[in-house]
Amino acid sequence: MSTSLQPLPGVSWFDISDPNSLDLDKLADRFGFHELQVEDCRHRPQRAKMEEYENYIFCVFKHLRNDADFTFEDFDIFLTKRELVSVHEPNSDILEKARLRAEQSKVTDIDKIFYILLDTIVDEYSPVLDRIADETSEIESVVLQSPEPKVLARIFRLKRNLIEFRRAASGMREVVNSLVRREGGLLSDKFDPYLRDVYDHVVRTTEFIETYRDLLSGALDIYLSAVANRTNEVMKVLTVLGTIAIPAIAISGIYGMNLKGLPFQDSPYGAEWVGGMTILSTILLLYLLRKLKWL
Amino acid sequence: MSTSLQPLPGVSWFDISDPNSLDLDKLADRFGFHELQVEDCRHRPQRAKMEEYENYIFCVFKHLRNDADFTFEDFDIFLTKRELVSVHEPNSDILEKARLRAEQSKVTDIDKIFYILLDTIVDEYSPVLDRIADETSEIESVVLQSPEPKVLARIFRLKRNLIEFRRAASGMREVVNSLVRREGGLLSDKFDPYLRDVYDHVVRTTEFIETYRDLLSGALDIYLSAVANRTNEVMKVLTVLGTIAIPAIAISGIYGMNLKGLPFQDSPYGAEWVGGMTILSTILLLYLLRKLKWL
Amino acid sequence: MSTSLQPLPGVSWFDISDPNSLDLDKLADRFGFHELQVEDCRHRPQRAKMEEYENYIFCVFKHLRNDADFTFEDFDIFLTKRELVSVHEPNSDILEKARLRAEQSKVTDIDKIFYILLDTIVDEYSPVLDRIADETSEIESVVLQSPEPKVLARIFRLKRNLIEFRRAASGMREVVNSLVRREGGLLSDKFDPYLRDVYDHVVRTTEFIETYRDLLSGALDIYLSAVANRTNEVMKVLTVLGTIAIPAIAISGIYGMNLKGLPFQDSPYGAEWVGGMTILSTILLLYLLRKLKWL
Amino acid sequence: MSTSLQPLPGVSWFDISDPNSLDLDKLADRFGFHELQVEDCRHRPQRAKMEEYENYIFCVFKHLRNDADFTFEDFDIFLTKRELVSVHEPNSDILEKARLRAEQSKVTDIDKIFYILLDTIVDEYSPVLDRIADETSEIESVVLQSPEPKVLARIFRLKRNLIEFRRAASGMREVVNSLVRREGGLLSDKFDPYLRDVYDHVVRTTEFIETYRDLLSGALDIYLSAVANRTNEVMKVLTVLGTIAIPAIAISGIYGMNLKGLPFQDSPYGAEWVGGMTILSTILLLYLLRKLKWL
Amino acid sequence: MSTSLQPLPGVSWFDISDPNSLDLDKLADRFGFHELQVEDCRHRPQRAKMEEYENYIFCVFKHLRNDADFTFEDFDIFLTKRELVSVHEPNSDILEKARLRAEQSKVTDIDKIFYILLDTIVDEYSPVLDRIADETSEIESVVLQSPEPKVLARIFRLKRNLIEFRRAASGMREVVNSLVRREGGLLSDKFDPYLRDVYDHVVRTTEFIETYRDLLSGALDIYLSAVANRTNEVMKVLTVLGTIAIPAIAISGIYGMNLKGLPFQDSPYGAEWVGGMTILSTILLLYLLRKLKWL
């Protein structure tokens, strides 16, 4: 086996950055991995999972892709008693980050590297959560000020992202939980506090996701009630306008009739009288509507 | 027993493509199947289920019918220590697909054939999920652009299909889960990784169904808020039109009155004066409404 | 004990078709039933339940009344090692149906009769489920075509029935489940497949109830969005009408003014000119609104 | 200890009708109750709970206050091997009812009195449930006939009461359940059927509460859709009125113009011609709208 | 170790009011706390949690900040067999309150101090719950009287606070529950009643939070239906106004036409006749609409 696969020289950690490479088959053959798991590495995406065998543990972790696109990718790890094999997409930067951490803290234990990889993957969730928090706050303030359809589109896009995120995070929670609860076996018990720490992190993540979902539902409710309100306001304007216009229209209509016997018809101050009457009845009507709490 | 029932010559796999055929009774008699299970094969549809007896396992699996109609059908399997009996509808193509797979990989083990049948059935879910994914995306984009009642009908039809699908898939999940958790017995433990793989597949399917349900609910919310928005828009148009018309109507009404003493009544430029007045008061009114944030 | 209580001569199955009859007290005394259970037989309705004592099992089953009213009634059964006592309302036809089935299959075992009674009760759910399915489909198609308030009333009545049904069916599911899980005791294990069959039936029933509830909620959503849509449509009609009328009213108002200097006022083709102007401005306005996507 | 505290002479049942009385401290001291439970008796309200110690059981039960106000109060019971201490609010009539029942059935066992107290408390739920059932039915019928805001207020008040009730009842269910599941200990096993009976009663209560909540949500949906419908109806009236008026207004406007060349202007039957024209175009317009399914 | 860290002289309770202080590292070193827990003290906020090791228990409790801002802070406690270390934010007044309580009751046991700290933290929830209760009641009464958008903003702010509160409180519930269920170990069993008391308190808190959430949802429903109602009312006003105006406008339009042959045109009481006609037809129209239940 060429050492080119080994991120840290001298440590039996093998990294395969192309799931379709033949190296994976070779390693699987050498360490006795099941053909189905090799297939799982190649047929992506898989659900987050942990499978324990006599000789090795196989894990599928979900990590966020670098770009801001909210897509999750698989990061597969085989852990035997003495070796670790990691399989991932070519463009993942998890590997590099974990390698650096391991190098800096001079880690050579295979199970410590396993922990570092898992921790690095889960740590990547935090900046995304922060971005979601910001987006949610912004939506909440925008929706109260100007409930436009484009806010709606933002709400639904974020909601879709949260659905995606929740699926990945709750899968990870299950996996880390079964890693914590595992009795004895390949990972020594001294890692339990560390795994529990990662578990806390994942649980906190899922809790925040639920919180943001609740807040977004709230924002949608605000949106809908704001639109209902606005319709109501516009209706009122229409009614006030109508109320102002109606006396003018009715009275001017009456005096426009080719009839005899209308009061003030022949008075020289006819216009003033009728104008006054119109203004008066408009005011009276508005007052009445307000009094009856209709406006 | 005629070998015509045997899809693979020399393998004790018996296939009955008509649940009402007498062959089923004969086989049930020969291998000691319970009368209730034979009844279950005939009274369709049943729920997906797995029943373990001393001598055999009886399973009802749910598979999608070939046509694009989202109807599920039962696929019944009896598995004894040495024989497998499959019972299905005449028009099912699961049998043929599984037979080909078994033939190509030269499988003669009865329990491997059991796995292949189950896997083929679950594999058939994927293209349907993809079709649902496409339909959901399309609905989502259509609903934002033109919220017409016919999109609504599509949303509800898809929702109904998802309800159906979820019922079948969550039944299958339970069944495959109890197959995985089964200790010892008729299926040897070496199939556990394969069954777990199928289990992962079914769980992923149910998760996707939930995701699509969430997205469809979102689409319905978009639809409703889009309609509310449009009503709001139309109301505004009505109000603007009213606002434009009212001064014209009121003023022209006033000057239509058979009264004396109206200003400009006898001026030769009366029309210009009054026209100017009308236009001015319309602009003023629109400005006022905008200023008061009523429009 | 008079044999008049025995539906099948020679079989120690006692049937009491009036819970208040003294025969119940006599039998309770003779077989040592607890006073509380006798009370349960008399104070109806009870929840579906199964209580196991050293000497006997007491069950309350819920069956649908014959008439199409969606009301559930109690059917009480005491099962001892050698006797079965059934207690029910006078007008129940479950008893007769079960008696016929037992007679035809020449059943004399007390526990087989227990199974037949339970199965008959659960079988009665199916025609009602079918009726609900038909009603749901009909509502769904009606609601899309003509969303009238009377459909609403149908939706809510059916919803209420489903709430009732679900309460009874989920109680029965629990009861049958505990009958299946019971280890040893009064019912011999050879009935397990039969009880499991009944259990499947009840579970399927509850699943269908959930499905119909989901579909009804969907129908309600369709109703509400259809009404919102229609309001929107009516608003548009109003706006179009307003748009058509406004130029006519404004222009005719202008020419109705007692002013001098209006164009075409004295032209012999005044009517034609002004009419043309009116029609033109109406068309222009409609075109403008459409262009601005306001209509 | 003065016998004035003993509701039944000669039975070691002590009743304290004022939690702040010093008698409680004396009894707690004498029988060795924990200071925290004495505090629980005084700091009301507590959650329904059951705490089992070596020497005694402490229970907090929730009972409805006499007045029709839907408020729950605590009823505290300490049960030792040989004594029962009940603590309650001064105005509770549970005590008196239970005392009468115990007296009439000549009960002197301390644990039978415990059961009677619990049963009396739970029995008090039934009339309230009936009242809620009546109120729900009435609301349901009112809401369909006249969806006024005051029905809305009734719905929400009842909903609030149900929230309160559910909290108390589900607490009681837990408590009675743990009383039933308790193995051995202070309450002899012969009470199990009685406790199970109470348990059934409480479970039925919570089920009914859920049913009424469902029905009330339905009533709210009816209300909202009835309002939406009514808005729709009013809009239609407005549109029909507009449609009827528009031809009259437009045509009369046209003939009100000071122009020459209008048809029928000088005809002696001008009024009849133009009137006919107006009526005809109104009918035509209404017919058109109906034809286009706009009304 | 300087005694300046000891809130109570002579008791081995160490308090660190600045998580970043080096004293924490020193104490962690001396008592053998895990580095991850020290990190947890510094990286705030953490979830409420309880971690039990061989030599010590580590707890993260959530307490409300003093100001009325609804933000939660961590309060960390390490409890060994003989020492207690508390770590908190500089501005927390929990420490001072707990110190006073311990001083007054002359407590020197380390585990009693643990209980006092926990109890003080949970006690602080009560005034906040009361404030929420008041706010909820106020919102409920305001929303029925005047459903303005600013009530909506209050509803959503309170809802957001409740989401926050629920997250903290349900975390605390889990933690206190695991403290109660802990068998033996560092906290002696005599604290069980006290811990159970705290547990009851936290559960009651979470139940109240759920209740307030339900009530707030109800308030939102009231708001939305009130707005829908008001829109409906405004529509009716508009329709009534239209109905009143239409006969006047139509009739006056008719008599404004320059036509011959209109009835009463030349009568000296023309105005009276036509006026009467107008009033009569208005009344008739209103009566008709009412009769047809359109208004």
Image: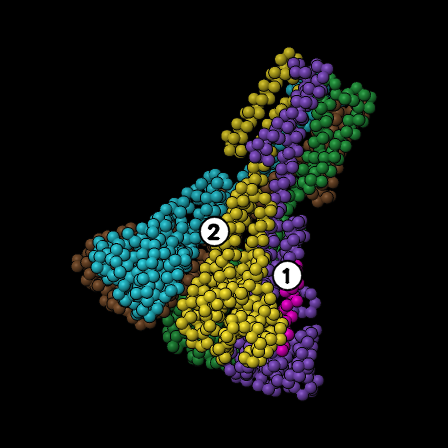
Chain colours: A yellow, B purple, C green, D brown, E cyan
Q: Which residues are magenta?
A: B116-135
Quadrant (top left/top right/bottom left/bottom right) for the C terminus of chain D: top right
Give the chain letter at badge 1: B
Q: CA distance from mark 1 to mark 2?
A: 42 Å
Amino acid type assigned to the residue bearing label 2 in the image: Thr
> Relative to residue D74, is residue A207 drawn left or right?
right
Quadrant (top left/top right/bottom left/bottom right) for the N terminus of chain D: bottom left
> Relative to residue B287, is residue D66 drawn left or right?
left
**Is disc 2 on the same chain as disc 1?**
no
The residue under the point 52% across, 73% down is: A9
- The residue to which callout 1 is attached is B133
- The part of the image, by quadrant, that contains residue D203 is bottom left
Whether residue B132 appears in magenta in the rendering, the answer is yes
Residue C95 in percent (x, y) is at: 52, 71
Residue A133 in percent (x, y) is at: 50, 52
C99 and E131: which is toward the camera: E131
- The residue to which callout 2 is attached is D136
Whether residue D155 appears in magenta in the rendering, the answer is no
